[in-house]
Amino acid sequence: MGFSDWIQIEAVGFSGGIWFFWNNSLHITVIHTHPQFLFLQVQGANQELWFYAVVYGSLTHHLHCRLWAELSMAKRGITGAWMVAGDFNCITSQEETNNYRAFSSQHSSYFVDWIQTEGLVDLGFNGPKYTWIRAGSAGQTKGARLDRELCNIGWRQRFPDASITHLPRVLSDHVPLLIHLANGNSHRSHSGFKFQATWLTSTKLSDLVRHTWRSDQGIQENIPRLTEELHS
């Protein structure tokens, strides 16, 4: 397939299994393997290392609970920037599915608790809302956002321009996820501006808005100036 290196977690029958491919321009160290995830250390040329977890969550409830217990920076004794992405086979809220009868508030609460405990934020996405779609009975189509990308504050600060795209489905009921780590020197445009939820964790945010926003001017004059200050 054109890659220089790879690691595989074997599937059990038709369930599970992860393949991870990379080229030798990256230095990848396998920190931990698990039936539901790979925990990796990533380092590019002349770049600081960061951590990456690739997930394929089990559909079996008691096995899924092990995912939340095992996939933890504290349990691995690691600190630093990290991102986790893949098929979690779980959603955070009822709004992330159109199949309300299959929604489990208990399963979602475990997922949300784990996200908060690990201090992760959702990277968002461009493209279709649902990452899994399947035709159901009586012509009904089921859909849910089972796949996603999460990161901690350190990773978001390292890659402030990173973006996620849900690509079209081809020969699968899941969409591929494209994670683009934008060049740190790329020029941002005002049309692509997005407020980052991580900024809310900064104690300086309120002061920045207060000092930048001019009460003698309207919103059209204030927004561009505030946008520049937030980017800076």
Image (cartoon, rainbow, N blue to C red):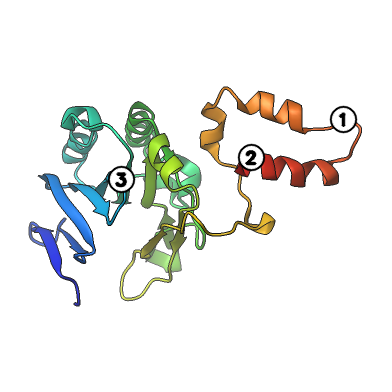
Q: Residue at x 89, y 37 (%)?
A: 217
Q: Amino acid at mark 1?
A: Ser
Instruction: Judge from the rendering whether residue 43 lies leftward or rightward of residue 94; answer left or right.
Output: left
Q: Residue at x 28, y 57 (%)?
A: 45
Mark 3 lies on a secondary structure that is: loop
Please indicate, yes or no, whether residue 58 appears anywhere in the rendered image: no
CB contact under 8 Å: marks 3 and 2: no
User: Residue 80, labelled with which disc?
Assistant: none
Which quadrant would the C terminus be assigned to in this image?
Answer: top right
Quadrant position of residue 219: top right
Quadrant position of residue 28: bottom left
* Image height of 107 relative to 180, above or below: above
Measured Cα–Cα span from mark 3 to mark 2: 24 Å
Q: Amino acid at mark 3?
A: Glu
- Residue pointed to by mark 3: 48
Q: How many marks?
A: 3
Where does residue 143 sit, x and y in percent of width and height?
Answer: 42, 58
Please indicate, yes or no, whether residue 229 appears anywhere in the rendered image: yes
Mark 1 lies on a secondary structure that is: loop
Q: Crowding near pointer 3: few (<14 within 10 Å), some, many (20+)? A: few
Instruction: Judge from the rendering whether residue 107 lies leftward or rightward of residue 37; answer left or right.
Output: right
- Residue pointed to by mark 2: 230
User: From this viewpoint, which residue is outermost toward the front?
Assistant: 46
Mark 2 lies on a secondary structure that is: helix
Residue mark closest to the camera, 1 vs 3: 3
Where does residue 46 sit, x and y in percent of width and height?
Answer: 30, 53
- Residue pointed to by mark 1: 215
